[in-house]
Image (cartoon, rainbow, N blue to C red):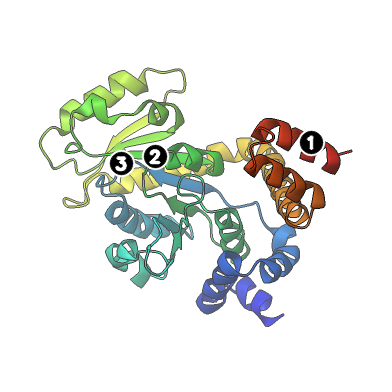
Amino acid sequence: MDLILDLKKGKRGAIAKAITIIENDQPEAKKILKKIFKETGKSMVIGITGPAGAGKSSLINKTVVAMKKLHTKPAVLAIDPTSHVTGGAILGDRVRMSESTDSGTFIRSIASRGATGAISRSLRNSVRILEYAGFNPIIIESVGAGQTEVEISNIADITVVVFNPHTGDSIQTIKAGLTEIGDIYLVNKSDLDGTNQLFDAVRDFIGASERNPIILKTSVKKNSGIIQFAKTLKEMMVSKKKLKKEKDNQRLETELKDIVLNNIQEKMNEMLNSDKTFSKYLKKLRAKDIDPFEAADKITKSLVR
């Protein structure tokens, strides 16, 4: 398969095509994964999350350029809320990241497709495609809606939470879930008023915890703090490498359970659609001769003997 050879060479067209297959064509996706799986799992995954409007895209744009200068080869997956019209991803992120794209970084928007939070099931496999193509680290930017932030930390080896001083009352912005997941907390847009108060609030509220996360200030506008942030990420990639194996083992267990349960659900749906017992009890239920729980128990017993 030429696609696999081109992937190994890191050809952009092949990477884009492979990720499109991962997102849209399950039988073909399985074939690709079968060929590349053994050589995946080596890259560090950095999750960057935080409230909408925190300035994540512009920050990633600058950070990626700084990380390339530190001799790493970053790629970016930006999880977008699905565009309801086309089912594709809204590409605002890509527009804001033009500088890093020009420097040869691979950037791809992934539609969340209404999966749990905003993380699509294809994300794990898109990360594998980028690993196989030789990228390290792989940066995942979440849209920062609801549960996504916490879910990002389940996939990432390093989690970065971005705040900015203008997202409302400083402490109120810091949702409980976010206080527990960050390895690095960034007060971005630090050229704005209120930066020092927010920095102090984050330090007092989160920095004093047992995990002892790193807290930094960055400003894309003034180009300050970006190099320090990139260096911190590179150092953390080295220090977290030791924990990666253990984390990956847990993730593979979760992934395997997810896939098995999904397979069972699909099989069950097929069985129920053609099952006589199911249609018999559905009629009784519609006629109010039986309640839903009793009907479900009887159907389940007939299927799982």
Residue 188 in which image quadrant: top left
State how far apart marks 2 and 3 are (Cα): 9 Å
Which secondary structure, mark 2? loop
**Which one is in front in this view, the residue at disc 2 or the one at disc 3?**
2
Residue 54's label in the rendered image is none
281 left or right, relative to 303: left
Q: Position of residue 10 (x, y in %)?
A: 56, 72
To which residue does mark 1 refer? 298
**As displayed, is residue 303 above or below residue 272?**
above
Chain-order first, disc 1 or disc 2: 2
Which secondary structure, mark 1? helix
Residue occupying image coordinates x 74% and y 43%: 281
Chain-order first, disc 3 or disc 1: 3
Residue 51's label in the rendered image is 3
Q: Position of residue 267 (x, y in %)?
A: 76, 54
Q: Position of residue 75 (x, y in %)?
A: 47, 60
Q: Residues within 10 Å of mark 2 (few under 14, many from 20)?
A: few
Q: Is residue 198 visible?
A: yes
**Which one is in front in this view, the residue at disc 3 or the one at disc 1?**
1
**As displayed, is residue 128 above or below residue 231?**
below
Residue type marked 2: Gly
State how far apart marks 3 and 1 are (Cα): 47 Å
